[in-house]
Image (cartoon, rainbow, N blue to C red):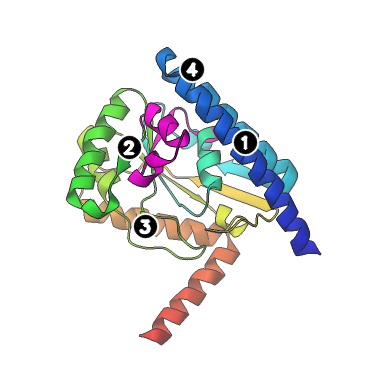
Amino acid sequence: MKDFIVVIRSSLAGSLGLAATLFNSVFVILATPFGDKVQYRFVRGWAHTCHFALRFITGISYEVIGNEKLPQEASIVYMKHQSVWEIIILFRIVPQLVFVLKREAMAIPIFGSALKSLKMIDIDRSSGSTAVAEVIQKGTDRLKQGLWLGIFPEGTRMTFGKTRRFGKSGIYLAQEAKAPLVLIAHNGGEFWPSKSLKIRSGHVKIVISDPVQTQGRTVDEIAAECEAWMEKTMFEISSAYAQEARRFAENQSLST
């Protein structure tokens, strides 16, 4: 019975979220001639509507730890990618934001056009160094326009408890553009798992790091620091994440 209620609540929240996505996508496109600030009013409206549905229908609440650490100027954000939840919430935390995303998203009718009008950076993830060059070139341009840049350094949506080596395009960009790089850890995937339509109630902790020093250091050194901070923080804020991470590590050691 409890699982059935979760499904019903998740379906209601999902339906409201889809309606908000379609509605606000249309108005984001129509607002293009009026500039970024007008467009982002609709983006924030979308994020607030989705958060309302998640908070009051499915029961997911959240708190932000370290919000004062966000720089004043446009910056690069590295964030764990576990579900749609963190995308919604990031638009509530960070000012005008563009994401680095897979090119296929731009092909979605209406939604893809809205993404394009918001100057999202679409890349072919299989193109290697070409994709990195695109992130650096377009990312520098967006930062100069005062837009923040959201990057999921693991490159894809991860199962809760799993991680992988971080991509380095955001670090190259931070060095090239001399822009701040901040990390955000959260346990949203504990309640809204990757590739799942079931959303359980719970309280999410979001932790923001101090800006990472990127100048005068090697890219590998910075990537290792980012990976270590992210995993350490995930273990601290979520015992469920720590348990899953240990289980995955044990299974991997048994299979080798």
Q: Which of marks 2 and 1 is nearer the N terminus?
A: 1
Amino acid found under the numbered disc labelled 2: Ile
As drawn, the residue found furthest toward the front would be: 109
The label nearer to you, 2 versus 1, is 1
Q: Distance between the residues labelled 1 and 4?
A: 20 Å
The magenta region covers 92-119
Q: Are marks 2 and 1 in contact (CB under 8 Å)?
A: no
The label nearer to you, 4 versus 3, is 4
185 with respect to 142 (left or right)? right
Amino acid found under the numbered disc labelled 3: Glu
Q: Distance between the residues labelled 2 and 1?
A: 24 Å
Q: How many marks?
A: 4
164 with respect to 61 (left or right)? left
> Circle 2 sits on which residue?
121
Q: Give neighbour class at mark 2: few <14, some 14-19, many 20+ (Cα, 10 Å).
A: many
At horizontal 36% and vertical 51% (from top left) the residue drawn is: 153
Q: Is mark 4 on a helix, strand or loop?
A: helix
Amino acid found under the numbered disc labelled 4: Val
> Circle 3 sits on which residue?
227
Quadrant that contains the C terminus: bottom left
Seen from the viewer's position, the closer of residues 56 and 183 is 56
Q: Are marks 4 and 3 in contact (CB under 8 Å)?
A: no
The label nearer to you, 1 versus 3, is 1
Q: Do the residues labelled 1 and 4 touch (CB within 8 Å)?
A: no
Residue 116 at x, y percent in the picture: 37, 31
Q: Earlier in the sequence, mark 4 or mark 3?
A: 4
> Circle 1 sits on which residue?
19
At horizontal 49% and vertical 56% (from top left) the residue drawn is: 233
At horizontal 62% and vertical 43% (from top left) the residue drawn is: 63
> Circle 4 sits on which residue?
38
